[in-house]
Image (spheres, grey):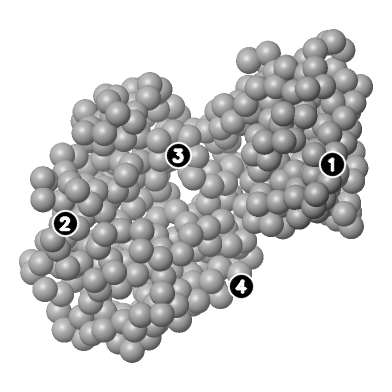
Amino acid sequence: MMWSVTTLDWHGDRSWTGLLDAAPESDGIDLAAVRRYRLQRVRGEMAARGIAAVVLSDAVNIRYATGARNMQVFTSRNAPSRYLVLTADRSILHEFTGCEHLADGLDTVDEVRLAVTASFVAAGGDIEAREREWAAHTAATIRALVAEPNPVVGVERFNAGAAIALAATGLRVVDAQEPVEMARAIKSDGEIACIRASLRMVEHAVGELRDAIRPGITENELWSVLHRAVIAGNGDYCETRLLNSGPRTNPWFQETAARTIQPNELVALDTDVVGCHGYYADFSRTFHVGPDEPSAAQRELYRLAHEQVAHNVAVIEPGLGFREYAQRAWDIPERFHAHRYYLSAHGCGMSGEYPYLYHRADFDAAGYDGVIEPGMTLCVESFIGAADGKEGVKLEQQVLVTETGTELLSRFPFEQALLDG
């Protein structure tokens, strides 16, 4: 793949408005077909593993399988309070009290029932009895749908008592993560259209954030610009709060705070936005505050991060094994190795997902076997900051794996002033 990017002259043109197509690219997407494809993917992966039913409580996975959305953060934390029982031919959404109407019109949901909430905050000291009640209801539902006497049932993200109680009913309980993650890994053309729409919206939100950067604004104030634009663009939420400035850019993973941004510092951002149609827009950029030109040290960090991302995007191709990718990936210089990003690349769909692609030095300890396939969407990561350095640079691109190579999905420009010199 020939990898080229648009860059901006920070001082010559602070505003990037007009450089990207403002259209949300949502027109013409057959969302019903997207939902049906995803549901078929889950059922296919279940069948391949001999799993007769799954009980999904992760709100993102429920949305993937059905398109039904409701209080995603709340219900993922308070589980089981909303869950999906899915078999080869039946989809029953157990919805939070008062929310049964939210799945109206979804042909991927055959029936909506009230959930039995089996969390401690809902049941208090009666939690064990409530967990047994939940398990009995769930087991009865599955047995009514599946002819096998002791079917294999995949579950995920329940409190331990609920999972133990379900196993005690005689069902053969296994983990549902593998079939769902493998289903999500390969995107349809409709899903790619949704991802493009989400990226275009979030890129415009990041453009508003970029234009708001100035000395004297706090990190929290700047981060709120992104939130406002994401919500106004019909996005869902930011999954992390990874925006930082100056000395807080190194090491990475320092969350947005009340710190006041100073002149001539770097500001680093990882979007991590669940945007349009529930699809993740995940790219990273680092900006220079000004008013002066970036320093030589800042430019070096930026150029190295840009080089790492460009090299690793060029490495990706269909059929490449995960270990072989690690061996071909950019060799991180020793002085930046201690603060390296924990991954070289990762899957991306409705959130961060399978696969994780590790650095060469980390593969033996953390890596696993697998193959890069057409239809995967991957985010290629870089963080460059020395262990004794004052600042760091975070860059990331989102790409689609095609039959012949990759296609760049994220279009937000890089900073020419930081690449020059």
Q: Quadrant of the C terminus?
A: bottom left
User: Along the horizontal axis of the image, is 418 left or right of 205?
Assistant: left
Spatial CA distance of label 4 from label 3 is 27 Å
Q: Nearer the viewer, residue 294 or 33?
A: 294
**Mark with earlier residue (4, 2):** 4
Q: Amino acid at mark 3?
A: Gly
Say few, some or many: other residues with alpha carbon within 10 Å of mark 3 (under 14 / 14 to 19 / 20 or more): many
Q: Secondary structure at mark 3?
A: strand
Spatial CA distance of label 1 from label 3 is 37 Å
Q: Secondary structure at mark 2?
A: loop
Q: Residue at x 44, y 77 (%)?
A: 220
Q: Residue at x 40, y 27 (%)?
A: 372
Q: Nearer the viewer, mark 1 or mark 3?
A: 1
Q: Residue at x 40, y 55 (%)?
A: 283
In the drawing, what numbered circle is on residue 387?
2
In the drawing, what numbered circle is on residue 232?
4
Q: Amino acid at mark 1?
A: Arg
User: Along the horizontal axis of the image, is 209 left or right of 394?
Assistant: right
**Mark with earlier residue (1, 2):** 1
Q: Amino acid at mark 2?
A: Ala
Q: Residue at x 75, y 23 (%)?
A: 167
Q: Nearer the viewer, residue 195 or 403?
A: 195
Spatial CA distance of label 2 from label 3 is 28 Å
**Residue that extends furthest to the bottom in the rendered view of this protein:** 216
**Mark with earlier residue (1, 3):** 1
Q: Which residue is mark 3?
A: 347
56 vs 74: above or below? above
Instruction: Pinpoint residue 103: horizontal percent, then vertical percent.
Output: 83, 49
Q: Which residue is mark 1?
A: 130
Spatial CA distance of label 1 from label 4 is 40 Å
**Mark with earlier residue (4, 3):** 4
Asked if residue 317 can be seen in this view, the reply is no
